[in-house]
Image (tube, grey):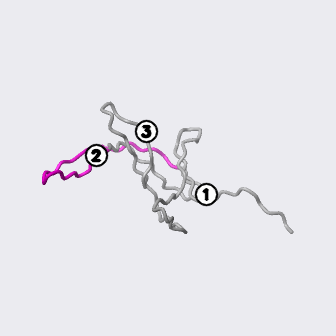
């Protein structure tokens, strides 16, 4: 899952986060453009905890600092020479391990 993040470290390298989910996400439709949106990630909780909205379900999570940071690298081959470029640093993960809660917007009255 790729997320846009504007946070950078002191060297200007973007900081990314890992999203960890317990379970399986099944998407109903494939988007012809190749971009599939699974849900929305928000930080609007009172405590600043991440909230993930997938369809008609809400998952509450927490931000966990990784014990050892990881680097996301890109392999570049130019004139038979291999170089590696650091694309981002991963220092935290967003952990969603609780069961999803359904979103109920309107309850129909008895007809």
Residue drawn 62% across the image and 59% down it:
56
Q: Earlier in the sequence, mark 3 or mark 2?
A: 3
Q: Is residue 104 above or below residue 66?
A: below
Q: Secondary structure at mark 1?
A: strand
Residue drawn 19% across the image and 53% down it:
77
Relative image position of residue 105 (x, y in whole percent): 72, 56
**The residue stretch that appears in magenta:** 61-87
Q: Secondary structure at mark 2?
A: strand
Q: Is residue 31 above or below residue 81?
A: below
The secondary structure that most of the magenta stretch takes on is strand
Are the two marked residues, 1 and 3, in contact with CB atoms closer than 8 angstroms?
no
- Left-right relation of 56 to 111: left
Would you name the residue on which mark 3 appears? 6
Nearer the observer, 44 or 7: 7
The nearer-to-camera label among 2 and 1 is 2
Q: Secondary structure at mark 3?
A: loop
Toward the front, the furthest residue is 79
Whether the magenta-drawn stretch holds residue 41 is answered as no
How crowded pointer 2 is (Cα within 10 Å; few <14, some 14-19, many 20+) is rated as some
Residue drawn 46% across the image and 57% down it:
21
Are the two marked residues, 2 and 1, in contact with CB atoms closer than 8 angstroms?
no
Spatial CA distance of label 1 from label 3 is: 29 Å
Would you name the residue on which mark 2 appears? 71
The nearer-to-camera label among 1 and 3 is 3
Toward the left, the furthest residue is 80
Spatial CA distance of label 3 from label 2 is: 17 Å
Nearer the observer, 110 or 85: 85
Would you name the residue on which mark 1 appears? 101
């Amino acid at each position: 899952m790729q997320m846009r993040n504007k946070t950078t470290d002191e060297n200007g390298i973007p900081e990314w986060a890992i999203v960890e989910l317990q379970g399986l996400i099944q998407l109903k439709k494939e988007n012809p453009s190749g971009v599939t949106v699974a849900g929305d990630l928000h930080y609007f909780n009172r405590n600043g905890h991440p909230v993930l909205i997938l369809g008609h379900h809400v998952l509450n999570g927490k931000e966990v600092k990784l014990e050892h940071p990881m680097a996301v690298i890109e392999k570049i081959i130019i004139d038979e020479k291999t170089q590696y470029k650091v694309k981002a640093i991963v220092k935290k993960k967003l952990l969603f391990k609780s069961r999803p809660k359904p979103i109920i917007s309107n309850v129909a009255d008895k007809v």
